[in-house]
Image (cartoon, rainbow, N blue to C red):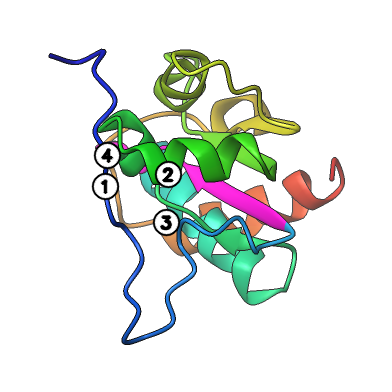
Amino acid sequence: MADKIEKDVCCDAKTNDTCCSGAARTLILACSGGSNVGQISNNLMIRLNMEGIGNTYCLAGIGAALSGFIESAKASQTILIDGCPTACGKKALEKYGIEANKYFVVTELGIKKNHDFNKLKDETDLALILLKKQL
């Protein structure tokens, strides 16, 4: 059942993984959908992590109703990046009463949604500049 929250162990004690600990100052979640803007949102999440703005986080864990992921997101500052107005990421968070502290939609940054993945680097670079102006 989709609404059932599953108890889970999502952190690996052997690697000191803090995916569900809420230890990150800011969690960054991205849609990672099947279009260019979905992949750009994922790339933005990685780039923001690399720049020290926050830590990448697993939106799929929330969508899969894994309790550790949900509780960590509730307890943290969050940046959510959706690719398009369909807003799958936003809807996944809302299902569990989570509202992102900062919310971005790649198409609202001026990137047109398509299935051409040849320009991802350039589109990601442009979107990063525009997104960072709004942080």
Label 3 sits on residue: 120
Q: Is residue 37 left or right of residue 98?
A: left
Q: Residue furthest left?
A: 1
- Distance CA(mark 3)–CA(mark 2): 29 Å
- Distance CA(mark 1)–CA(mark 3): 34 Å
Of the numbered discs 1 and 3, the one sitting upstream in the chain is: 1
Residue 29 percent location from the top left of the image = 52, 45
Of the numbered discs 2 and 4, the one sitting upstream in the chain is: 4
Residue 7, disc: 4
The secondary element bearing badge 2 is classed as helix
Label 1 sits on residue: 8
The secondary element bearing badge 4 is classed as loop
The kind of residue on which mark 1 rests is: Asp
Residue 111, picture quadrant = top right
Contact flag, marks 2 and 1 (Cβ < 8 Å): yes
- Distance CA(mark 3)–CA(mark 4): 37 Å
Q: Which residues are magenta?
A: 26-34
Label 2 sits on residue: 69
**Residue 39 on the magenta segment:** no
On the rendered image, what quadrant is the N terminus found in?
top left
Q: Residue at x 87, y 47 (%)?
A: 133
Choose mark 2 or mark 4, whichever is in front: 4
Q: How many marks?
A: 4
Of the numbered discs 3 and 2, the one sitting upstream in the chain is: 2
Choose mark 3 or mark 4, whichever is in front: 4
The secondary element bearing badge 1 is classed as loop
Q: Residue at x 47, y 58 (%)?
A: 43
The kind of residue on which mark 2 rests is: Phe
Contact flag, marks 1 and 3 (Cβ < 8 Å): no
Contact flag, marks 1 and 4 (Cβ < 8 Å): yes
Q: Is residue 36 visible?
A: no
**Residue 30 on the magenta segment:** yes
